[in-house]
Image (cartoon, rainbow, N blue to C red):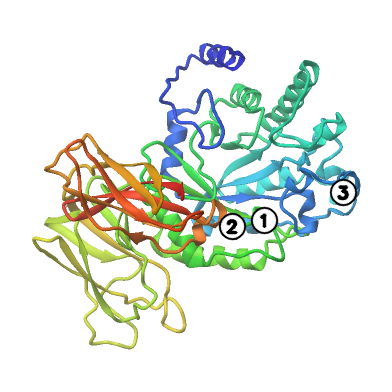
Amino acid sequence: MKIVYITLALCFFYNFSFSQNDVVNDDEGSSYNLNKPEREEWLRNTGAGLFIHFNVDAQLGVVISHSLVGASNDYVDRYFNDLPKTFNPSKFNPKEIAELAKMAGMKYICFTTKHHAGFCFWDTKTTDFNITKTPYKKDMLKEFVDATREAGLDVGFYFSPEDFNFLRSHNIPISRTNVKMDAKTTKEYNDYNRKQCEELMTNYGKIDVFFIDGEPKEVVKETCWRIQPNLLITRGAIKTPEQALPGAKITQPWLSPITMGTAWQYQPTNDRYKTGTQLINLLIEARAKGGSLLLNVGPKPNGEMAIQQEDRLREMALWNFINHESMDSVRSWVVAKEDDIWFTKKGKNTVYAFVTDVADWKEGARKNFLLRSVKSTANTKISVLGQNSQIIEYKANLDVSCKYTQTADGLEVSVVKAQRIYDDHRWPNPVVIKLENIEPVFAEAVFVKTMGSTVNATGAVLKGQVVDYKPSLSKRARFYYRPYAGQVETLYASPWEKTVWVNINADGTFSVPFKGKKGSRVEYKAVAEQQKVAVEGETSVVSL
């Protein structure tokens, strides 16, 4: 009840209203959203941002902050007493980072002002556990803010209200899930976070984006919106699915924070980086599903960006230099994808088709693609972003023009990869086909809902439904499935497999028996066919 009263008071104070349909974050409850509509629209137009996770324990190459949970007294004491004495990120160069992020298509950078451990990267008056009390001495946050603004990017802050340093100083066991405080300590905790947020919101000028990670978030939101009402709060107010992308399109603004490897903070060993191609594909998928990607990097202890991270950002920068128009200020198409081809839309009649399976597509080779969700008009034009499709190096007589033919089955597009990107004439990253003055085959895709499942002796029965079902739009459905690898491992999971097609019942429901090994976990999603186009639902997991 206390949160409800606070929320109602805040809405009255700001003359805003909210409903039960307001979007909240996936893994943390949020009672209200005071984001201005124009700020959320800005996020919808924004393809990507750069996330920077940094902490005093980067010196250890350890998981950021979390190693303190369940740690011995000796570990905890040395963590808080010894690590600040040797933390000196003297090679931190926010100007270089910001310029590279901008080339890679990022519109903002979000920096960890304070992670769960409680170490602050600004000259705070609330605690000595901060960057100015280390050999570095300077206010690193100010350096970040100034460099980011100079590069023309928006400024974002990550902030954790959870503070292990506060818990330790009050003799409260360090935990994220079982923290017990009396009323006096709770008030002190809230005041502590309030004072820190007041410093962040008043000492660094206009802040554009704020990412809240943990509790107590309500006091953080109230403080930040009170001082900077135009602030866009992401986690804490809108959907921010972490380390995974939604299985289907989402109409409200959302972003997905994802690491380059498996770690948020720099880890010199035992991390597995995604390839540049995988990261570009994640960006494309996020945009096709109506959201944006918040791609994370973690500087080395000396402040430098790890070469593995820089290399991948430069690969993304090259791709963005060629294909930027397909990412900025775009929306979802009627379907997010057709097989390995993803879509975004700009305006009413321009669509970008992202061909992601291009590893074997050689320079100078012509390929044909059948697109079932689009149809041509009298003014249709086809092109490949980055090339003029008139000339190819060293092959003067080769026809590299773009062609299309409207057939009864769909729009057949014929294009040539005709631009030399790498010295070896190989380009493994997605090719973007621009289709102008086209129309959708259907105005709106059916809404496919992945339902629950019933476990039995041989596996399970997977269930789905087409909401507001009309037999004229869709007659059959199936499921995609694969072994569930876990949240962090989902992005490394095996390819989807497909069940047989089944007929959809009169009420829109459908089901398929699935045989699986007892004790295993399976990730699955419902798929319905609409005019020969597969429309996918959200993912779900069943334990057999």
Image quadrant assignment for residue 115:
top right
Percent of width and height locating residue 177: 69, 34
Instruction: List x then y, in percent, for residue 40.
Output: 45, 35
Q: Can the viewer see residue 145 in this picture?
A: no
The label nearer to you, 3 versus 2, is 3
Residue 20: which quarter of the image? top left
Residue 206's mark? none
Eye-nearest disc, 1 or 3: 3
Dot 2: few (<14), some (14–19), or many (≥20) neighbours within 10 Å?
some
Give the left or right position of residue 264, taking residue 208 as reference. Answer: right
Q: Residues within 10 Å of mark 1 (few under 14, many from 20)?
A: many
Q: Is residue 504 left or right of residue 254?
A: left
* Left or right for 154, reference 479: right
Q: Pick whichever, 437 or 447, lies toward us.
A: 447
Residue tagged 1: 298
Give the alpha-carbon distance from disc 3 to disc 2, as whole Å: 38 Å
Name the disc covering residue 99, or none. Answer: 2
CA gap, disc 1 and disc 3: 23 Å
The residue nearer to you, when weighing 261 against 220, is 261
